[in-house]
Image (tube, rainbow, N blue to C red):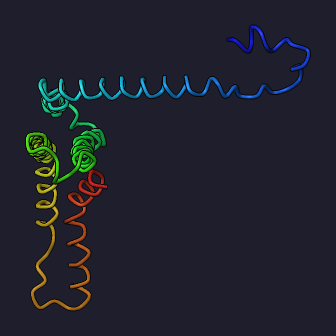
Amino acid sequence: WLHNEYVRDLPVLQGQVPEYPAWFEQFVLQWLDENEDVSLEFLRGALERDKKDGTIGKVLMQYADILSKDFPAYCTKEKLPCILMNNVQQLRVQLEKMFEAMGGKELDLEAADSLKELQVKLNTVLDELSMVFGNSFQVRIDECVRQMADILGQVRGTGNASPDARASAAQDADSVLRPLMDFLDGNLT
C-alpha cells in the first residue's frame, strides 16, 4: 500500500523495480513468528479437542456404518462394490501412515491404542463388506453350477477311451466349466 500510494509515482523511480525496504523486514519476520505461535497453538487446541471428542474415529466409523447399511444395494453394480471396499482399505492405509507420521512406536500410548482400535474396526467392516459382496454372487454361482451339471450330464464317460475321445473329453470339460468361469472372469477382473 505504501509503495503504491506514495512511492510508485515519483519521477526518480519511474520504470524501476523498487528495492525491498530493509527496515520492513524485521516487522515481517516478527509477524511471521507471532503467526507461527498462534498457528501452533491453534493446532494444539484442535489436537486436544480431537483427543477429547474422538472426531477422526467418529467420522470414519459413521462412514463405515453408512456404507455397511447401503452396501447390499451396490452389489448389483459391476465395479462399485470393489471401489467402495478399496476406499475402506485406503482409509486403513492412511491410518497406518498417520500412525507412522505421528511417531510410530514412540507415539503416546493412548493415541496409539486409539489408532489401532480404528484399524481393527475398519478391518472388521472390510471383512463384513467382503462377505456381503461374496454372498451376492451366490445365486449366480448356483445358476452356473446348475448349467455345468446340465452340460456334464451330456458328457460321455471316457473310461479306456482312445486319444481322440480323451481330447474330446478335455473340450467337454472346458465346456462344462465355461458358465462358471465366464461369470467369475467377468466379475473378478
Foreground residue among 189 and 174: 189
Position above or below: 80 against 18 = below
Instruction: Determine the residue located farthest toward the top in the rendered image.
Output: 5
**Residue at image location 79% in from the left, 13% down from the top:** 7
Q: Is residue 24 found left or right of 174 in the rendered image?
A: right
Instruction: Give x and y (percent) for residue 155.
Output: 15, 71
The answer to whether residue 139 is visible is no
Q: Is residue 42 in view? A: yes
At a point 24% along the width and 25% down the height, the residue shown is 46
Reply above or below: 32 against 7.
Answer: below
Q: Nearer the viewer, residue 59 or 80?
A: 59
Q: Quadrant of residue 113?
A: top left
- Disc tally is 0
Query: Is 58 in front, or is 140?
Result: 58
Question: Residue 132 at x, y = what percent?
Answer: 11, 41
**Quadrant where the C terminus is found in the figure:** bottom left
Q: Nearer the viewer, residue 50 or 42?
A: 42
Q: Position of residue 133 (x, y in %)?
A: 16, 44
**Name of the residue lying farthest toward the right:** 11
Image quadrant where one finds the N terminus: top right
The residue sitting at 36% across, 23% down in the picture is: 38
Indicate left or right for 25 with 124 as reference. right
Picture coordinates of residue 85 (x, y %)? Answer: 22, 43
Indicate the quadrant where residue 172 lies: bottom left
Relative to 111, does residue 57 appear above or below in the rendering? above
Q: In the orientation shown, which residue stands out farthest toward the front?
A: 23
Identified at 28% across, 57% down, the residue is 185
* Horizontal side, residue 157 vs residue 185: left or right: left
